């Protein structure tokens, strides 16, 4: 009985370890796309500001 409990704990740890992997990658890509989108928006806003002021 004592040997089975650590096995169950290990399997839950492996399941928890596998789940955040793809999630962290998805969040990483989402953050990159979000920052890229912000950069594009600020660049366009800056160009419009230059055109309006200049």
Image (tube, rainbow, N blue to C red):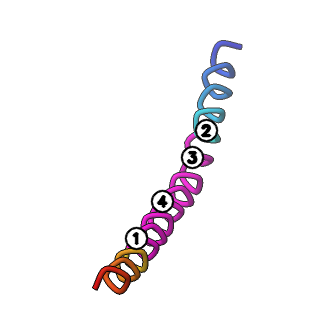
* Residue holding disc 4: 31
User: Who's the residue at 52% across and 52% down the image?
Assistant: 24
Residue occupying image coordinates x 35% and y 86%: 51
Task: Compute the Cα span from label 2 to label 1.
Answer: 38 Å
Q: Secondary structure at mark 3?
A: helix
The question of residue 39 being in magenta is answered with yes
Q: What secondary structure is the stretch in magenta mostly built from?
A: helix
Q: Which residue is mark 3?
A: 20
2 or 1: tag closer to the N-terminus: 2
Image point 62% across, 47% down: which residue?
19
Q: Is residue 23 above or below residue 50?
A: above
The magenta stretch is 17-42
Q: Residue 12 shows which numbered tag?
A: none
Q: Is residue 33 left or right of residue 18?
A: left
Q: Nearer the viewer, mark 4 or mark 3?
A: 4
Q: Which residue is identified by label 1? A: 42
Q: Is residue 40 left or right of residue 51?
A: right
Residue highlighted by disc 2 = 16
- Mark 4 or 2, which is nearer the eye? 4
């Amino acid at each position: 009985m004592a040997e089975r409990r650590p096995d169950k704990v290990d399997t839950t740890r492996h399941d928890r370890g596998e789940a955040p992997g793809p999630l962290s990658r998805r969040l990483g890509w989402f953050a990159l796309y979000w920052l890229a989108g912000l950069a594009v928006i600020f660049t366009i806003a800056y160009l419009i500001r230059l055109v309006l002021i200049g």
